[in-house]
């Protein structure tokens, strides 16, 4: 299966999981489980939510225990929240200010999630492999996030 087709399938599965369900935490939990069981070569998939303008707090996830709070502007997740742009990091150890929540993680992709024009949360996916994620992964995960954002009320 082509990567684009794979992500289109994930978006459809996401849509069927969250349509009609208004509870954000439940939807994040199901999306985390879907991603963790569907994506190859990852060791963490989940969400951090904006807890204040200065800080993200751990949300639903699959994988090893994680950092509970991340300052906006720090690490890959905090940078995605601050810049409001997806962060596609081939080698987290070369990323200035990387926060090593799991020493086994070597690459990461973080997609900001918007509600009412502001960052509401970030989707964070880690891999033990260097350069696990590419532009196709980024586009597919951004499409999945758009589906999720459309369900946020």
Image (spheres, rainbow, N blue to C red):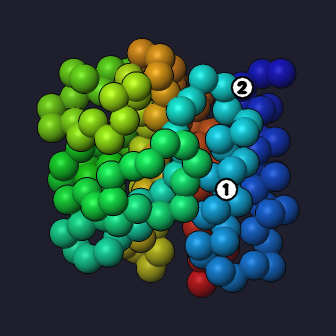
Say what secondary structure mark 2 lies in. Answer: helix
* Residue drawn at point x = 67 percent, y = 56 percent: 31
* Residue drawn at point x = 48 percent, y = 57 percent: 47
Quadrant of the rendered image containing residue 91: top left
User: Could you tell me if residue 133 is visible in this image?
Assistant: yes
Quadrant of the rendered image containing residue 116: bottom left
In the figure, is residue 150 to the left or right of 111? right
In the figure, is residue 5 to the left or right of 150? right
Q: In this view, does 79 lie above or below 40?
A: below
Residue placed under numbered mark 2 in the picture = 3
Q: How many labels does the image show?
A: 2
The spot of residue 107 in percent (x, y) is 40, 26
Residue 2, numbered circle:
none
Q: Looking at the figure, which quarter contains the N terminus?
A: top right
* Residue drawn at point x = 24 percent, y = 40 percent: 99
User: Could you tell me if residue 147 is visible in this image?
Assistant: no
In the figure, is residue 86 to the left or right of 137? left
Q: Looking at the figure, which quarter contains the C terminus?
A: bottom right
Q: In this view, does 107 lie above or below 77?
A: above
The spot of residue 51 in percent (x, y) is 32, 75
Residue placed under numbered mark 1 in the picture = 31
Say what secondary structure mark 1 lies in. Answer: helix
Disc 2 residue crowd, few under 14, some 14–19, many 20+, Cα 10 Å: few
- Name the N-terminal-most of marks 2 and 1: 2
Mark 2 or 1: the one toward you: 1
- The residue most toward the front is 65
């Amino acid at each position: 299966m082509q990567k684009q087709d794979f992500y289109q399938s994930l978006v459809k599965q996401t849509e069927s999981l969250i349509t009609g369900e208004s509870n954000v935490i439940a939807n994040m939990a199901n999306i985390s489980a879907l991603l963790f069981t569907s994506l190859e070569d990852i060791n963490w998939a989940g969400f951090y939510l904006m807890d204040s303008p200065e800080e993200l707090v751990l949300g639903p996830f699959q994988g090893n225990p994680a950092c509970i709070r991340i300052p906006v502007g720090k690490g890959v997740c905090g940078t995605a929240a601050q810049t409001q742009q997806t962060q596609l990091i081939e080698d987290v150890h070369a990323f200035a200010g990387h926060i090593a929540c799991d020493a086994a993680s070597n690459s990461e992709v973080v997609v900001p999630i918007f509600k009412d024009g502001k960052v509401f949360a970030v989707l964070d996916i880690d891999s033990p492999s260097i350069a696990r994620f590419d532009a196709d992964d980024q586009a597919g995960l951004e499409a999945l996030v758009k589906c999720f954002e459309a369900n946020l009320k």
